[in-house]
Image (tube, rainbow, N blue to C red):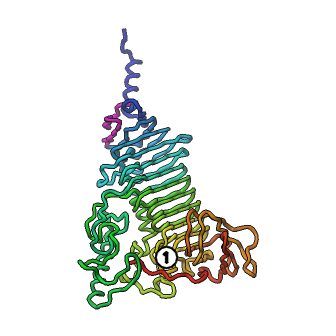
Amino acid sequence: MFRLNNYNIFALIMLCCTACHADTITVTYNENGQPVVSPAECEGMKITIKNGTVKIKDWRTEPTELTFVLKGKSHEGSFKLNTEAKATIRLEGLELTSGSGAPLHLKNRKKMEVIAAKGTVNTLTVTACPDTATQKAAVIWAKDKLLLSGNGTLNLIAQGNGCKGINVKDDIIIEDLTLNIQTLGDNLGVDTTSNMGFGGPPPGFDPNNIPEEMKAHFEEMRKRFEEMMKDGNFPMMGGFGGGFGGPPAGGGFGGPPTGGGFMGKQKYLSTCKGIKAKGTLTINSGKVSVTTNSRGAEGIEGKEGVTINGGEVYVHAIDDGINSGGQIIFNGGHTCVISTTNDAVDSNSGGFGFGMPPFMMGGEPQDSTTSKPQNHQNQDPAIIINGGEVLAWSQTGPPEEGLDCDFAPIQVTGGTIFSVGAGMGDMPSVPTTETAKQPTALLIGLDIEKDKPISIYEADKKGNPTGKPLATYTVPFDFQSSSSLITCPTFQLGKKYVVKTATKTYPIELTEPFTVSRQGEAKERRFPF
């Protein structure tokens, strides 16, 4: 017969306290049954398990920091946490798939850390995102700051239409871990049959998420075009769809119906971006790979800024590779960004955001010799490169660029840059004499052959390459007459350099901190409005 004595009473009290006040909760997913949560109950929390989903609501009034360990495997499950406490999600060999929104859904009020444990491979997949309108359409969704870390591997696969890889309504920090993200779905319900207005918004345009300053720009644009039409001065500019030969029958500004028409019918709900931070996004270390596969799907977006301090970052996106409404800063590491239909690296902090020249938005007039605003040197830099290696390659041609910052300057204080792209006319976004603190060249007219080496050498007095190459690259596509920004830490003013491809040699002489080297007769490029 079991009898209670002082020892047994003490043991029961300790067991109860452990269950109620545990600082670690373990969730083990089971392919053939429901997940197991240990401890199953905890004071101040509501833990529910249904259809492979674990929901934890933290009601504690004075919450202490918790650690949640997730492991196991399930082809239909998710983890949803609602807490005001700081928390850590530790992944220890987790394979989790959800068919109804984010498999990792974090309604946090303080910074949350997700750790991929050392030596583990963790794979999270979302196959469908029915709740895109509420912004939870992602493999990982978080309400507040999110830190992704650990010495393991985290694979995120977004298969469903409108599903992102990571969607955070605040800041994101990434460090140490190997992070691989693929988005495979398409946008939802874009109506491409209407042709109302200014050519339709670009792919990925979200009418429900337009900044107020952008709305003001749109309104100012509309007024200016109306005034020009009244005065008979409507611009005749070449470009897609034959340009502006005057307003088409039925009104509007013409152009191709790329997304339902400016202010026209628009059913678009969500793009399949790789990483989206409503605040800033910072990569400190580790290996980050992002691939997108549908129109409008950017690789990495930090609404308020993007900073890469180190690590290896590879982005292959259909839309912008790296995009921000704030500054994009490279301090170190190796970054390679490829866009197939848009800019590789695009900062909208210095201009309108769709590449519109400031003179059309009430800004300063352009200098016709440079295709840049005359007050270019007085603007704050939008892209800053202090160190590391930055390879920014846009495959689509004019007006898309390797590095685009909407008429604001690029600042170069160190590091290595090799960009591929075009720009407005021949001139893409560039540094100024003041912001090129490390000598930098713009090589206009560089022909690139797919997968053939492109090397940069020092040159002798006659312009012949000497010594070993300073850098060598291979680009995975052909490109004729690229406007390529080039620099490396060994560049010196007054010296000559050579860019050598498999069939041609391009001389560069660094006569100024920022030097333009034009090769051959480059064809004139016009604004594609």
Indicate left or right for 446 with 326 as reference: right
Q: At x 30% / y 72%, what residue is drawn?
A: 215
Indicate left or right for 481 with 494 as reference: left
Quarter of the image containing the N terminus? top left
Q: Residue furthest top?
A: 1
Q: Position of residue 166 (x, y in %)?
A: 42, 53
Q: Quadrant of residue 214?
A: bottom left
Q: Which residue is mark 1?
A: 423
Is 104 in front, or is 399? 399
SS for tag 1? Answer: loop
Q: At x 28% / y 64%, what residue is drawn?
A: 266
Is 28 in front, or is 396? 396
Q: Position of residue 388 (x, y in %)?
A: 60, 64
Q: Position of residue 205 (x, y in %)?
A: 35, 65
User: Residue flagged by tag 1: what amino acid is it?
Assistant: Gly
Q: Is residue 388 visible?
A: no
Dot 1 alpha-carbon crowd within 10 angstroms: few under 14, some 14 to 19, many 20 or more? many
Q: Is residue 54 magenta?
A: yes
Q: Residue furthest bottom?
A: 231
**Magenta region: which residues?**
38-60
**Figure check: 519 above or below 382:** below
Q: Is residue 167 visible?
A: yes
Is 241 in front, or is 343? 241
**Figure check: 481 above or below 176:** below
